[in-house]
Amino acid sequence: MTKLIQMEWKKLNQKTVWMELLIYMLILIFFPAFFIKVAMPAFGQSYAAAIELNGFIQMGYVLFGGSLINHVFIEEYKNKTISLSFGYPISRQKLFTAKVLFIALFVFFATIITFILSGLTTYLLDQFFPIINGKPTTSDMLEFFSSMMIGSVLITLISFIPLFYFGIWKRAVVPAIICSIFIMQLPNFSLFFNVKPDVVVIILSILGAISIFLSIKTAESVGEI
Amino acid sequence: MNHVVKTSGLTKQVKGKNLVTDINLHIRKGEIYGFLGQNGAGKTTIMKMLTGITKPTSGEIELFGQMLSERSKSVLKRVGSIIEYPILFEHLTALENLKLHCEYLGYYDEKGMKHALDMVHLRGIEDKKVKEFSLGMKQRLGLARAIVVKPELIILDEPTNGLDPIGIKDIRDLIFMLNKEYGITFLLSSHILGEIEQVANRIGVIKNGRLLNEVALEEIRKQHTDYIELLTTNAEKTVYLLEKELHISNMKIIQGNRIRIYDLSHTQNDISKLLIQNDIGLEEIQKHSSSLEDYFYKQINGGGMND
């Protein structure tokens, strides 16, 4: 399986993916400090509030996940390179599992790294241009790392929501990306529906897991060329 | 009979429409089998099923005596193919495309890859990105990929598409060489009947998704006698002279002064000379060779099934 995951990476236009990742990272690293300074200074009242904000901002990786679904699944169908994979002595379920794991690992580690870098950047900027009240406490640090781990897992799961329907069934790039943008924004609007953002995130994660399950389970039927 | 490919009742249905129906294909070890059929007859669909790209709706595929199914695809290691057109990763180089293919098949031999590129005359551009390739170069690279892991069966759908006449000859020679020296079995399709005629040992004619007939080219040649057709000013006298002077008896007057000679022991020149010497006007003389084309059109226009 490790070999298959590596090959998914080799097949990609790596320069494009690295460039995309760089852009996401740059935006998401500086966005928390920018947001506190320009849009919502309320999140600067404490490090706890800033950490909560950072967690929501990293939802941006849901969109990156959508973009990877496009590169790894939809483009392969559109360019017909998927038929090459189907001609190898590997079952379609195994091929799709490798693709899913590749996207999952990429999104997960990119989110983790960006979490750390955005935390450090926000802290350093706060040292030079104070935007957050007080200093980070040990409990803030623990909260940051637990939010980083849990957040990265949930964001990874959520990013798979468009996979089954738009990625494999419809093979449609634009709807898949629009779906990712909508999902990414959904927790921010949860209060309009009187639902806690955390509940929305958990529901979305379950939907992502269902999408992964259906994608692999139906690889032989829905995944047919 | 040692069959490399054997299918029984192979059927593919898409959206309620049968693309191919009840295909019983038999390809023997070491032969070059040509698929003949009009566009949309179902040649590519059959090839896609044989290479695991698409699954049959019903029926069975046996490759090298092993059933091909989604759960048992290991036999595909022994098959190389180009279906429809060479599908390549355009942003990768020629060598990277070959490496990726080899890795999927658990084969790694850089020398072998370079040798495959040599065979298709693509040496020296292995580090060039495929997006910079012409269609002919892509076709050659597709072929290099099909042969790089030394498969025992190579399935090529329109392998000479996009190639210039020299390229076509190169590919034909390569197919002959691989078939003769390495004993590789080939399944080819081409819309150019002459191409198949020059390469194949046996053909399968497909019409509207059904395999009408499987026959050896040698058999077609035997069944369809060549003849010389001539139009003279005096048919009776011509027949008399041909029988008396050249001892030709296998001939018939087909219409007016038009005669067909099936005994080809004498050349057109001998016949012309004889008629001129005897003051018989010769308006037309032509040798007809019945070709695969004749056979194909006969099959397509009402040829029977061979079940």
Image: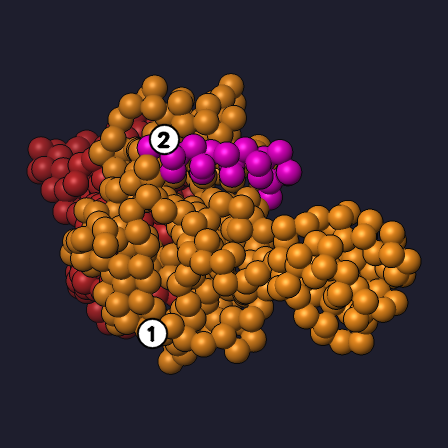
Residue A140 location (% of width, % of height): 13, 38
Which element type, helix, strand or loop, lies under badge 1? loop
Residue at 9 percent of width and 33 percent of height: A138
Marks counted in the figure total 2
Q: CA distance from mark 2 to mark 1?
A: 34 Å
Q: Is residue A136 left or right of residue B116?
A: left
Residue stretch rendered in magenta on the structure:
B162-182
Residue B150 is left or right of residue B291, and the answer is: left
Pointer 1 residue: B307
Residue at figure coordinates x 52%, y 78% from the top left: B302
Would you identify the image quadrant in which residue B183 lies?
top left
Q: Position of residue A119 (x, y in %)?
A: 25, 34
Up the image or down, A131 lies above or below B233; here it is above
What color was chain A assigned in the picture?
Answer: red
Image location (x, y in percent) of residue B184: 34, 39
Query: Is residue B226 something one can see in this rendering?
Result: yes
Residue farthest to the front, as pictured: B244
Vertical comparison of A193 with B175: above or below:
below
Of all residues shown, which one is farthest toward the bottom? B16
The colour of chain B is orange
Instruction: Specify whether residue B190 is painted magenta.
Output: no
The kind of secondary structure element at disc 2 is helix
What's the mark number on residue B181? 2
- At label 1, the amino acid type is Asp
Q: Nearer the viewer, residue A73 or B185?
A: B185
Q: Is residue A204 left or right of residue B201?
A: left
Q: Chain of mark 2?
A: B
Quarter that holds the N terminus of chain B: bottom left
Q: Chain of mark 1?
A: B
Magenta segment main secondary structure: helix
Q: Quadrant of the C terminus of chain B?
A: bottom left
Inspect the image, locate mark 2, and give the three-letter code of the amino acid beneath it: Glu
